[in-house]
Amino acid sequence: MESSASILPLSQLPSVFPQKPKRSNLPYNPSWLSNSKPRASRPPRMHCHKMYVPGFGEASPEAKAANNLHSFFTYVAVSIVCAQLESYNTEAYEELMEFLSRNSLNDGDQFCANLMRESSRHKGLALRILEVRSAYCKNDFEWDNLQRLAFKMVDESNTRLMRDYVLEISHVEGEQEK
């Protein structure tokens, strides 16, 4: 018994699958299909594949992270300079430690600005801290290690939290079944 089914050539496919009508051929253009504002007055759309992060109006999350790293680099530079001074210039070390007891390191730039204005000896310490901060950031900080550690911490933390939640829920459901 032979099959009567035949395979259509590609040239005949449009007759089987009719083309969609073009917008210009539509009898009317409903208002919900078009915006009332002309395109020129609307802000341009960003076509990127990154997440939109609300609540960072004045700076991006990356800029905020960079600001935190900037302050952290000051902290590291002060620690390095303190360790260096402790071994070869105890007088300067004691002056820097006394200044540290009176001034916060939360804002690294403000700390260095205040240190520069304290005295000529402190100005030299401030310049050394600025030099070490720059050198550490550019030469010694392991940026690829930071990214690897951040990914690892997020993955491990997410896994731990989800595991703890599942254990908690399964324990509660197990008690309800008894």
Image (cartoon, rainbow, N blue to C red):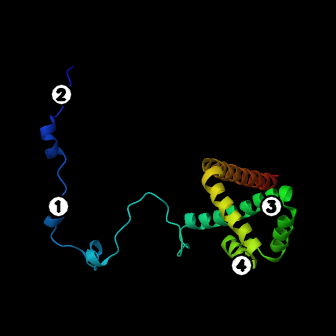
Percent of width and height locating residue 165: 73, 55
Work out how far the residue at label 3 is from the one at label 1, CA to CA, in angstroms. Answer: 74 Å
Residue 135 drawn above or below residue 123:
above
Q: Quadrant of residue 125?
A: bottom right
Q: Residue furthest top?
A: 1
* Residue 82 marker: 3
To which residue does mark 1 refer?
Answer: 22
Q: Nearer the viewer, mark 4 or mark 3?
A: 4
Q: For mark 3, does the 10 Å Cα neighbourhood hold few (<14), some (14 to 19), or many (20 or more) residues? A: many
To which residue does mark 4 refer?
Answer: 117
Q: Nearer the viewer, mark 2 or mark 3?
A: 3
Q: Disc 1 marks which amino acid?
A: Lys
Residue 38 drawn above or below residue 159:
below
**SS at mark 3 in the image:** helix
Percent of width and height locating residue 67: 62, 67
Q: Nearer the viewer, mark 1 or mark 2?
A: 1
Q: Residue at x 28, y 79 (%)?
A: 37
Question: Answer yes or no: do the residues labelled 4 and 2 have beta carbons within 8 Å?
Answer: no
Mark positioned earlier in the residue sequence (4 or 2): 2
Work out how far the residue at label 4 is from the one at label 3, CA to CA, in angstroms. Answer: 19 Å
**Would residue 142 appear left or right of 169 to someone viewing this image?**
left
